[in-house]
């Protein structure tokens, strides 16, 4: 009973935080826009509904675009869930996405393979590189006690400039006007699920499969239990005989592996060449998704859909009104603020705990009276 009540409370707390974040965004829209109601319509309704005069119809192509936007952030959200569950604030997912996408692209260009095997090998090698990226701050934390937050944040830019060096000086296609690689081999591209230019690839199905895998890993295996226990109480985990250091390293590697996989799938599914020249931002979005999901992998697809929906809404809002698309950053920051605030609805949570304690005492007293009779 108590667990169900706390689950319901956490869901309501999350919805309250989201509504407050949207309210903050609405305030900024009313302050900045000359047509705030049109902007809000584009933000909240237009991602799924197309308007033609006085008529409104469901827009499946827009839904496909939202699902396509979810693909990389599902993987980074899962990766952050695993890393944060071990109580390590590793921010290396952003660099892992970039490195995974770059390595996957190189395999897709220079290593010919059969069509069914090529994208699988490219994605797995990109994922492996992503895991090695997040392994660096984890080992620095375990071996020398360095802050994984600081080292991983700086490592993202080391990865960025190393990749830019090789992209500009080694792998660039000089026949193009912009800095990019040669085109991917057709056998390396991840096929589309639907036609119409939505870029919804089978990477979406792979993402859902990994949601199930990571949920089982975290809540149905000994290693997942150790990861969660170390995040809750590392001293208890240590004195219980758990190998804390190796489990921390494993959690960080898995997080980077998933992020690198997301980067490789995004590059090979959405583009024809590798042309990222800056950090793509999916790692930062993954942090917001993990916070929305409260580090529970099962909730990651819902959080990813919500942010992808808002992202699509902000794109439409910037196109059809006078509000810039950067409004999505304000919404994400507001969500982060309310979710990270430990005292947000703390009074309601305390009342729930007290009520549950009273109910348990009343049930125990009734049971005692019954036994006395």
Image (spheres, rainbow, N blue to C red):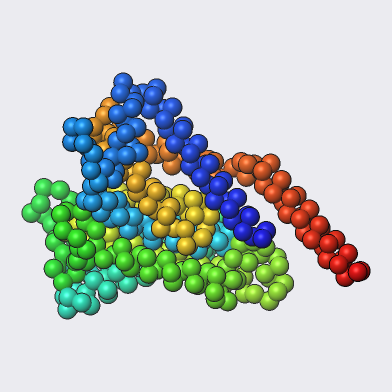
Image quadrant of residue 188?
A: bottom left
* Horizontal side of residue 12 vs 195, given as left or right: right
The residue positioned farthest toward the right in the image shown = 372
Q: Nearer the viewer, residue 32 or 14?
A: 14
Picture layout, residue 29 above or below residue 343: above
Residue at 43% across / 52% down in the picture? 303
Residue 168 percent coordinates (x, y): 21, 54
Question: Which quadrant is home to the N terminus?
Answer: bottom right
Residue at 52% across / 41% down in the picture? 17
The residue positioned farthest toward the left in the image shown = 175
- Residue 160 appears in view: no
Image quadrant of residue 261?
A: bottom left
* Horizontal side of residue 135 vs 158, given as left or right: right
Picture layout, residue 350 above or below residue 217: above
Residue at 48% across / 68% down in the picture? 215
Question: Which quadrant is home to the C terminus?
Answer: bottom right
Q: Nearer the viewer, residue 316 or 120?
A: 316
Residue 238 percent coordinates (x, y): 68, 70
- Residue 54 appears in view: yes
Residue at 26% across / 38% down in the picture? 316
Residue 204 percent coordinates (x, y): 31, 63
Q: How many marks?
A: 0
Residue 144 percent coordinates (x, y): 58, 62
Q: Nearer the viewer, residue 52 or 258?
A: 52
Image quadrant of residue 34?
A: top left
């Amino acid at each position: 009973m108590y667990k169900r009540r706390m689950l319901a409370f956490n869901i309501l707390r999350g919805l309250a935080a989201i509504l407050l974040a949207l309210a903050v965004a609405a305030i900024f829209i009313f302050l900045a826009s000359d047509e705030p109601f049109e902007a809000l319509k584009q933000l909240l309704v237009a991602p799924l509904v197309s308007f033609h005069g006085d008529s409104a119809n469901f827009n499946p192509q827009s839904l496909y675009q939202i699902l396509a936007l979810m693909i990389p952030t599902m993987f980074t959200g899962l990766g952050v869930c695993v890393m944060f569950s071990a109580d390590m604030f590793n921010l290396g997912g952003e660099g892992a996405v970039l490195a995974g996408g770059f390595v996957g692209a190189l395999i897709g260009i220079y290593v010919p393979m059969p069509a069914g095997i090529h994208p699988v090998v490219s994605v797995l090698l990109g994922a492996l590189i992503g895991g090695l990226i997040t392994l660096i701050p984890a080992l620095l934390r375990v071996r020398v006690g360095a802050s994984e937050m600081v080292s991983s944040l700086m490592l993202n830019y080391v990865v960025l400039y190393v990749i830019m060096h090789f992209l500009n000086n080694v792998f660039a296609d000089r026949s193009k006007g912009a800095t990019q690689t040669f085109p991917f081999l057709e056998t390396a591209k991840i096929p589309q699920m639907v036609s119409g230019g939505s870029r919804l690839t089978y990477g979406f199905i792979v993402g859902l499969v990994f949601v199930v895998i990571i949920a089982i890993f975290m809540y149905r295996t000994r290693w997942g239990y150790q990861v969660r226990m170390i995040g809750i109480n590392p001293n208890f985990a240590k004195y219980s005989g758990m190998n804390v250091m190796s489990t921390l390293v494993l959690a960080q590697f898995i997080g980077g592996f998933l992020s690198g996989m997301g980067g490789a799938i995004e590059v090979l599914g959405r583009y024809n060449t590798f042309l990222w020249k800056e950090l793509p931002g999916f790692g930062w979005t993954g942090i917001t998704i993990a916070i929305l999901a409260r580090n529970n992998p099962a909730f990651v697809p819902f959080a990813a859909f919500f942010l992808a929906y808002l992202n699509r809404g902000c794109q439409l809002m910037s196109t059809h009104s006078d509000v810039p698309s950067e409004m999505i950053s304000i919404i994400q920051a507001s969500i982060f603020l309310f979710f990270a605030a430990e005292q947000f609805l703390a009074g309601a949570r305390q009342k729930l705990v007290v009520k549950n304690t009273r109910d348990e005492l009343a049930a125990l007293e009734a049971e005692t009276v019954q036994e006395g009779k």
